[in-house]
Image: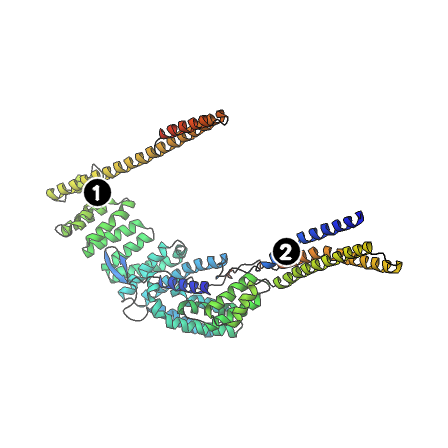
């Protein structure tokens, strides 16, 4: 009898062990097998790099071709100006910039031709191109030439930033002064932009002297405008400061409130621990906790 | 299928997102028109002429250089190139077709694929030739670079949804080929377990029978021999069942595709698609 029980137990153990070991495989067999996710897939790094590099090479090639087209059709002003604009695009692209050294001699010749063929608007194109190529002095000078030869106050205004960078503010102020009669009585914004150019090239001591070419009433109005701008800037700065302070105070209050709540919570826990299960004691602790929290503010 | 439609829509949106500026502004000067009043700028025409000539002239292995030249207008992001893409499209497509067909005939599979791929991106329509070339490329590299082959197969499906070869290859490379045999092994393990349990119940039945009924010595010997046989078979099956099942599981898991679809360095030919 004992032997029969032992055999039955051994059989049951063997079956149970064998069956339990098969639960995992049986579950996996019921799950659909894995497939590669759908979609177009990832772009390999090599492909990514190639596409980025090709954009730059293509821009450089397109610029070279545009310069060649400008050479081949010297009378076509649009092609000349387009070539200059392409050089600017190339200069503005960090990757294509590397190809500029190779294009530079050709570009310089095209720019010279553009100025010779059509100084207006060629000089402004050339000025913008020199600026894009990083030559502030040449850019500023070309803008001054454009202002003089094309009667363009906009060119004189555009000359301010590059000439200031090249430490040639006198030339900028001279150009602006020369253009004043063109803007006086024209659009107010243009006149103000011109006077702003003078301001950008002056300091507190030289501003009045540099604006000497402006009629007294206009100068008074302009100074009033500058004053209003300063006031506005100060007001904006003050508002920003108030806002910063308000945010800081809010953060501080929030942190203090959080600290207060955490202390209340600790006190309630300590109180409850001392109650040893006494219901009325626990209730008192809870009440104390509510009173404590209510004093922590609403943050 | 839905994801493919979504991808196609996104590609269309990406192409349409390239805005064409009619003019380029210049400070203190009039703006410059980005495209000529009619046709193409002479340098764009000259470039396409040059490419057209070179396609027939250069060695097939050098067609890649010609292809890059053909795509300058579509790769450069300057406003003048962007503005002339629409007008340059028909000639560019014709040149890419010639280039791709010549490369394909010369066995330059990758160059042909790049040319047709660019044509597909520019035209925005289905491209049967591209699907064929990509599928051939995918079949060639399926064993050594399954991830790349899968990318190519899926791109071929996108280029020509009717391409049966591409669909088959995509399914083939996306699927676990050991799943069926692995599952069969697991089922076989379950069957072995059931058979083992049956054999063990026979052992118990013989023991009970011998205990309940006195029998002649010969019958007892035969019953004991049966009992021993069932015992051996049952125990063997109970041991074998989990081994077979785990073997099937391991076999199945080892067949799970470990690759993801990933482009080769040469594709896509253009950013837009």
Subunit bearing disc 2? A
Q: How many marks?
A: 2
Q: Nearer the viewer, residue A227 or A103?
A: A227
> Which residue has dot 2 on it?
A25
Callout 1 secondary element = helix
Q: Is residue B15 left or right of residue B186?
A: left
Q: What residue did someone put label 1 on?
A: A199
Q: Quadrant of residue B69?
A: bottom left
**Which image quadrant: the C terminus of chain A?**
top left
Depth check, front residue: B178 or A239: B178
In this orientation, does residue B250 appear? yes
B5 relative to A161, above or below = below
Assign a secondary structure to mark 2: helix
| Crowd class of label 2 (few under 14; some 14 to 19; many from 20; radius 10 Å) | many
Residue B210 at x, y percent in the picture: 82, 56
The x and y percentages for residue B101 are 48, 74
Q: Residues within 10 Å of mark 1 (few under 14, many from 20)?
A: some
> Residue placed at 39% from the left, 55% from the top?
A97
Q: Chain of mark 1?
A: A
Earlier-in-chain disc, 1 versus 2: 2
- What x and y, as percent, mark residue B218? 88, 60
């Amino acid at each position: 009898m004992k032997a029969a029980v032992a055999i039955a137990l051994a059989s049951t153990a063997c079956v149970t062990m064998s069956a339990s070991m098969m639960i995992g495989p049986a579950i996996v067999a019921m799950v659909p097998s894995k497939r590669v996710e759908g979609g177009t897939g990832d772009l390999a790094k090599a492909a990514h790099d190639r596409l980025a590099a090709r954009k730059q090479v293509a821009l450089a090639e397109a610029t070279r071709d545009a310069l060649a087209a400008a050479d081949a059709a010297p009378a076509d002003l649009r092609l000349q100006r387009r070539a200059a604009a392409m050089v600017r695009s190339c200069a503005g692209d960090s990757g294509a910039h590397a190809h500029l050294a190779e294009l530079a001699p050709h570009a310089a010749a095209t720019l010279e031709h553009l100025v010779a063929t059509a100084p207006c608007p060629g000089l402004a194109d050339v000025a913008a191109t020199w600026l894009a190529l990083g030559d502030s002095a040449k850019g500023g000078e070309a803008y001054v030439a454009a202002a003089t030869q094309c009667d363009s106050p906009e060119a004189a205004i555009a000359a301010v930033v590059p000439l200031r960078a090249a430490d040639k503010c006198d030339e900028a102020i001279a150009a602006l002064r020369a253009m004043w009669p063109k803007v006086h009585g024209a659009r107010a914004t243009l006149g103000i932009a011109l006077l702003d150019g003078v301001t950008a090239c002056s300091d507190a001591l030289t501003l009045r002297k540099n604006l000497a070419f402006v009629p007294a009433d206009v100068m008074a109005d302009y100074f009033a405008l500058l004053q209003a701008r300063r006031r506005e800037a100060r007001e904006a700065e003050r508002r920003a400061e108030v806002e910063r302070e308000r945010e800081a105070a809010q953060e501080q209050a929030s942190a203090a409130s959080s600290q207060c709540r955490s202390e209340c919570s600790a006190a309630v826990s300590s109180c409850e621990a001392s109650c040893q299960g006494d219901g009325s004691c626990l209730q008192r602790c809870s009440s104390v906790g509510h009173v404590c929290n209510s004093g922590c503010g609403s943050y | 299928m839905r994801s493919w439609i979504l991808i196609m829509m996104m590609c269309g949106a990406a192409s349409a997102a390239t805005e064409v500026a009619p003019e380029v502004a210049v400070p203190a000067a009039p703006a410059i028109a980005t495209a000529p009043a009619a046709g193409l700028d002479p340098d764009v025409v000259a470039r396409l002429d040059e490419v057209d000539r070179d396609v027939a002239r250069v060695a097939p292995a050098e067609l890649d250089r010609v292809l890059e030249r053909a795509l300058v207008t579509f790769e450069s992001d300057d406003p003048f190139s962007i503005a002339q893409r629409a007008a340059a499209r028909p000639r560019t497509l014709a040149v890419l077709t010639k280039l791709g067909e010549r490369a394909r005939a010369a066995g330059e599979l990758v160059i042909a694929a790049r040319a047709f791929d660019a044509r597909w991106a520019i035209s925005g329509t289905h491209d049967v030739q591209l699907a064929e070339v990509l599928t051939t490329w995918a079949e060639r590299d399926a064993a050594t670079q399954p991830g790349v082959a899968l990318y190519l197969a899926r791109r071929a499906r996108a280029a020509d949804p009717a391409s049966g070869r591409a669909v088959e290859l995509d399914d083939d490379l996306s699927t676990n080929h050991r799943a069926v045999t692995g599952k069969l092994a697991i089922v076989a393990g379950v069957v072995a377990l059931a058979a083992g349990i049956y054999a063990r119940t026979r052992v118990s039945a013989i023991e009970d029978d011998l205990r309940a009924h006195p029998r002649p010595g010969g019958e007892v010997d035969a019953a004991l021999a049966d009992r021993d046989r069932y015992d051996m078979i049952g125990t063997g099956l109970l041991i074998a069942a989990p081994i077979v099942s785990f073997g099937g599981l391991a076999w199945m898991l080892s067949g799970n595709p470990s690759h993801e679809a990933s482009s080769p360095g040469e594709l896509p030919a253009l950013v837009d698609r």
